[in-house]
Image (cartoon, helix red, strand yellow):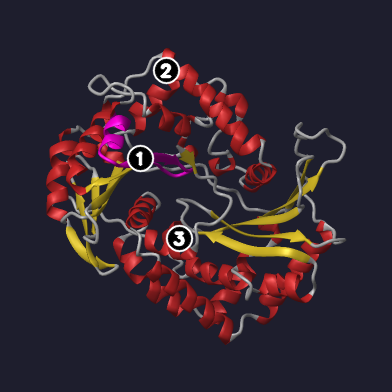
Amino acid sequence: MTFRQNVFPIGAAIFALALASSSLVTEGFATETAGAKVADFKLANGLQLVVIPDHRAPVITHMIWYKVGAADETAGKSGLAHFLEHLMFKGTAKNPAGRFSTVVARIGGQENAFTSSDYTGYYQRVPSEQLKTVMEFEADRMTGLVLTDAVVLPERDVILEERNQRMENNPRARLGEQMDAALFLNHPYGKPIIGWRHEMEQLSRDDAIDFYKRFYGPNDAVVVVAGDIEPDAALKLAEETYGKIKPVEGIKKRQRPQEPPQVAPRSLTLADPRVEQPVVQRSYLVPSFATGKAANKPGQSEALDVLAHILGAGSNSRLYKALVVDKHVAVGAGAYYDGSALDMAKFGFYGSPGEGVTLPQLEADADLVIAQLIDKGVTPEELERAKSRLVADAIYAQDNQASMARWYGQSLTTGATVNDVQQWPARIRAVTAQQVQDAAREWLDKKRSVTGYLIKDTSAPLGHPASAQPVKAEKRS
């Protein structure tokens, strides 16, 4: 069981394929994507079903996505979405703890689950004739979860230890956590997905049950099936299993606290005795695909995709060539953009200094690269290379059944449509050099950013993490 910490990108190509949703109320429809007819249905109880036929092997990937994540938690109860993800494996009256997993293992399948800021998902990869089996199990635990303190309290210890492993023992992850908290002044994206330890320690059975009853229902879920099955057959199975569940009353469109205008750059330094390689990292608050679309500003997300590729994707990128190859001030550098958030997204860069180079020096050199791009724009060669690579990566990435299911589910929970995914390559090809330059000028403004330094703390004993230094709303020189 995992959680997705929104620090680094999933990649523009992945996001491109992830953009898929629809809302037909009755029979649904089919559309061409990746050479197959992708069918999109909605059951009478509100559950959405997407079927991606792939007959190359007699297996299917079945995923159920709930439109709830860490950003939807009750204030003061961070980590609750991820905690419930764990507890969903504790059994129902019909299927006691362990039976679901035992059956999946016995038929040669695989299973797991994951939590992000915007969604929670559960999946199985099994022989195609076992699709109804896993649908029955998931439909049962959608409403039939049984929890007692005897299972809840030990699992709380499990997630606390997971936090130790993923966050406390990982200086880079701790830096990202501190930067998110500083970047998002008001939005719940500033909370770590796994939760703040002092709040995780107080999570209870009642917290989990209340959250479960509030969000887990067919009218807040998306089922994605990719593999060796025809859409009509998958729809029939879904109606026989999920279709019997009544919708949950009171589920509304998610409306979260939004960010105020960003008026000052922020910076922080995290010192830790376990740091082997110092890092400078910056995150800018920028539009996601969904927020750009909602604001009726088409092309923003695509321009940021292309900008991230030109600025920091690989050895031909601006940052790598300038900092690593030409000036020899860095041993690594890159940039990223994750446009798949339901609300505002992050654009960022990072770099590790070479020997004898300070983090302020490396940051200043990176700022020069960005300033030059803003001032002079990008070359035709850079633009075409980036667009060709993004489109090619999207095409090549379609050759994975489980990834297709994941991409569709992610997009359906973050505000995109089937048409969005169909038109993504065309929109990328339509991005102009002027759009890329405009995106850099508008969004790569330090007032919209947090810059983080990760340094080695030589004053603290190894194995004893130092505390993050206070956030300073100031510009480094």
Discs 2/1, front: 1
Say which mark, if any, is on residue 111: 1
Magenta-drawn stretch contains 42: no
Q: What residue type is labelled 3?
A: Phe
Secondary structure under tag 1 reads: strand
Dot 1 alpha-carbon crowd within 10 angstroms: few under 14, some 14 to 19, many 20 or more: some
Secondary structure under tag 3 reads: helix
Q: Is residue 443 visible?
A: yes
Mark 3, residue position: 289
Residue span colored magenta: 100-121
Q: Is residue 204 visible?
A: no
Discs 2/3, front: 2
For marks 3 and 1 on the same chain, the one whose residue lies earlier in the sequence: 1
Q: Distance between the residues labelled 2 and 3?
A: 40 Å
Q: How far apart are marks 2 and 1 (CA)?
A: 21 Å
Image coordinates for residue 41, horizontal then vertical, percent: 20, 52
For marks 2 and 1 on the same chain, the one whose residue lies earlier in the sequence: 1
The image shows a total of numbered marks equal to 3
Q: In this view, does 470 lie above or below 36?
A: above
Q: Is residue 26 above or below residue 68?
A: below
Mark 2, residue position: 151
Q: What residue type is labelled 2?
A: Val
Q: Nearer the viewer, residue 423 or 311?
A: 311
